[in-house]
Amino acid sequence: MIRNVLDREPDDRVSVLDSDGTVVAPELVPNLDDETLVSMYEDMRLCRRFDERIISLQRQGRVGTYASLAGQEGAQIGSTYALATEDTISYQYREHGTVLSRGFPWEYLLYWMGHEVGNAVLPDDNVLPLNISIGGHLPHAVGYAWAAKLRGDDRVTLVHFGEGSTSEGDFHEAANFAGVYDVPIVFFCNNNQWAISTPREQQTASETFAEKARAYGFDGIQVDGMDPLATYVVTEAVRSRAANPLDGEPRPTMIEAVQYRFGAHTTADDPTVYRDDAEVEHWKERDPIRRFEAYLRGQGLLDDERIDAMESAIDETLQEAINRAESYEGDPDDIFEDTYANPTERLVEQRAFLGDLRATYGDEALLEEN
């Protein structure tokens, strides 16, 4: 199976399901039990519903700026399920599915409400804290993978990033170090066609993003990111090679998951300014949830009743998480905790000033004033 997946050119895109859910590569269908397949589908629906709810909360002023994942559920869930539990995931800011499918700690919502504790709980599920700077987490992920190699354990690191990150120096440095030191890492490039408002064709002169891996001494492979089965089988194959490479084979691999961002870059963006509705509708015909559902219905694993039950359970889970997050009372003093490892003199002064205001007027009075 590994050879069938990896012995191909970077522009030979791997697909298992057609846009209507029909199997087009039976030899690549992963050997997953029925329970796992249904669980993947349910997590994809959870992702989509999570996205809808958080965007709604943001519009109501109950959540801060948020990056939508709609359209990218197949890549996120497919890649996460293909990893071992002990493998480490490092993500940018859009791959919420990696968090949701690894247990969905309700505290994750706190991050989007302005509380850093929402980031602090992620390592419990072997997910590194969310990164906002474009590509800034890539060198750290490589360092983490290198440490695993030096320790001699079998842990693999998978790092998610958008195709826009390949224009950053951090990408070059990370890929170069990964190749030189042969670290157990999977570079997972989420090519959703747009780096905010810059289209894919204006970002690189390379024919594919996957082929960039060759410059660093390892392989690149392109996959249909809106096909969860294809994403799973490719990630499983490269993960296996990263953990147990054959003689002379490099551990790193770069996956380019070709997909589309249905919504805005973030809730602060207006995509209608730079793309037209016809393009969006074209990609929605490849909706990862719809095509995977068609496949599972054909396998006799899904019907309307089961989907209705899933939706009810998902809404209940999300509402409980939202209720818990909105009842959380943070300490205003926490804003100083994670700014610097060693507070600067100015930060110490600001912290003392806030303390004096709180002691004099109380938190409630300060909130009313603002």
Image: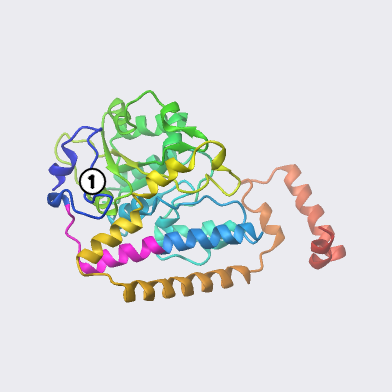
Question: How many numbered discs?
Answer: 1
Residue 124 or residue 104, whichever sits in front: 104
Residue 325 or residue 44, whichever sits in front: 44
Is 43 included in the stretch rendered in magenta? Answer: yes
Q: Position of residue 364 (x, y in %)?
A: 80, 67
Amino acid type for the residue under numbered disc 1: Ser
Q: In what element is the residue under mark 1?
A: loop
Is 220 included in the stretch rendered in magenta? Answer: no
Q: Dot 1, crowdedness within 10 Å: few (<14), some or many (≥20)?
A: many
Quarter of the view holding residue 170: top left
Asked whether residue 319 appears in the rendered view, the answer is yes
Q: Is residue 165 above or below residue 316?
A: above
Q: Position of residue 257 (x, y in %)?
A: 33, 42
Task: Classify the position of the C terminus by image quarter.
Answer: bottom right
Q: Position of residue 336 (x, y in %)?
A: 68, 52
Q: Residue at x 37, y 44 (%)?
A: 259
Q: Residue at x 28, y 72 (%)?
A: 303
Asked whether residue 102 appears in the rendered view, the answer is no
The colour mode here is rainbow
Residue position for label 1: 15
Residue 76 or residue 149, whichever sits in front: 76
Residue 121 or residue 76, whichever sits in front: 76
- Residue lying at the far right in this picture: please name it: 360
**Predominant SS of the magenta segment:** helix
Q: Is residue 172 above or below residue 121?
A: above
Q: Is residue 203 above or below residue 4?
A: above
Q: Which residues are magenta?
A: 29-45
Q: Position of residue 45 (x, y in %)?
A: 39, 63
Q: Residue at x 26, y 48 (%)?
A: 235
